[in-house]
Amino acid sequence: MPKTDILPDIAVEECRTDAEIVALYPIMREARPSLDEKTYIERTTAARAFGYRMFRGIFQGRVAAAMGLRVNSDLFWGRHLYLDDLAVVADLRGRRIGEAMMRFAEAEARAQGCKHVRVTNGLKGLQAHRFYERIGYEKRSFVFVRAV
């Protein structure tokens, strides 16, 4: 598909009910293949208690993308929007749907009084790294994790 400055026409809708969130599981599983449905439900339920919100992107009448985000605040970034999850249906990738979803997230960040959008991605997610850099995101830090 030729590169243009025109993003696809995506309707982004917030998923507010348990049923709407569960319906996004097959899309989220494409980004997190080790995540079973039971764990997905448990984790989204727990995260929603801390302000996690889920959105679906509708492209040509089909749910094409899923996104989870929340407003956060810390000493370094201050108030910011943290993008926890973004997944686009495999057969629709390359149509700039992910970019359209990110532009929605940026607009939501501004509406929520945030100055930045933050997203983390695993070290092995090189395709995702290229995507975020292509749409203007800077690689700024590493995340360190240790099981306890």
Image (spheres, rainbow, N blue to C red):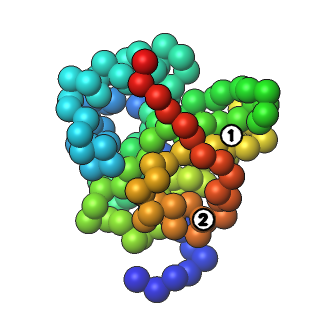
Contact check, label 2 and label 1, Cβ < 8 Å: no
Specify which label sits upstream in the sequence, 2 or 1.
Answer: 1
Mark on residue 14? none
Q: Is residue 129 left or right of residue 117?
A: left
Q: Is residue 11 visible?
A: no
Name the amino acid, label 2: Glu
Indicate the position of residue 67 as horizontal and vertical percent values.
45, 42
Residue behind mark 1: 109
Look at 46% across and 53% down and name the residue there. 123
Which corner quadrant holds the N terminus? bottom left
Look at 75% across and 30% down and name the residue there. 79
Q: In this view, does 18 lie above or below 67?
A: above
Q: In this view, does 52 lie to the left or right of 125?
A: right
Q: Which one is in front, 15 or 125?
A: 125
Q: In this view, does 10 lie above or below 37?
A: below
Look at 52% across and 82% down and name the residue there. 3
Check disc 1 and report its element: helix, strand or loop: helix
Residue behind mark 2: 133
Q: Farthest residue in the bottom direction?
A: 2
Check disc 2 and report its element: helix, strand or loop: helix
